[in-house]
Image (cartoon, rainbow, N blue to C red):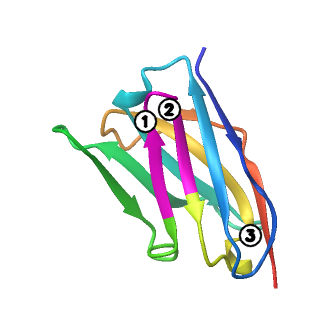
Amino acid sequence: QVQLVESGGGLVQAGGSLRLSCAASGLAFSMYTMGWFRQAPGKEREFVAAIRWSGQTNYIDSYADSVKGRFTISRDNAKGTGYLQMNRLTPEDTAVYYCAAAWGSSPKYAYWGQGTQVTVSS
């Protein structure tokens, strides 16, 4: 049974930082693209960042324009855990953050976590 469990959310002031974690179990973690998404109240879920296997010796990361330069996605395959380091947070970053996993470089995320709330106060 595949499980993705997020942690690290909370309340932070604007300009602050948070680090989200996503602990995966039940899947060959290193072979999966790991992504982060978020959903703010009244809005649709949106892509935040992803990190995928390049097919060679490294991973490639990608970001939404709204977080580029502020957020950093990473992974520790030995621990089966992904991370999202979020710096210079703004109230517009307030949302429930979800991690998700897709096999290889597939665009379809088959597995999702339950989400963790991030609230940024002004």
Residue beneath the point at 62% across and 78% down: 88
Mark 3 residue element? loop
Q: Amino acid at mark 3?
A: Thr
Foreground disc of the pair 3, 2? 3
Tell me the distance, in whole angstroms, between the alpha carbons under discs 1 and 3: 25 Å
Q: Tag count in the figure?
A: 3
Q: Of label 2 and label 1, which has the lower sequence position?
A: 1
Amino acid type, callout 1: Ala
Residue drawn at 67 percent across, 54 percent down? 97
- Principal secondary structure, stretch drawn in magenta: strand
Up/down of 75 relative to 91, above or below:
above
**Closer-to-camera residue (63/13):** 13
Residue named by callout 1: 102
Tell me the residue that label 2 is attached to.
Answer: 110
Instruction: Give the camera-side residue of 104 and 15.
Output: 15
Q: Are marks 2 and 1 in contact (CB under 8 Å)?
A: yes
- Specify start and end residues of the magenta stretch as a single range: 72-84
How crowded is the residue under tag 1: few (<14 C-alpha within 10 Å), some, or many (20+)?
many
Please state if 37 lies on the left or on the right of 34 as rendered.
right
Q: Percent position (x, y) of residue 84?
A: 56, 55
Residue at 64 percent of width and 51 percent of height: 20
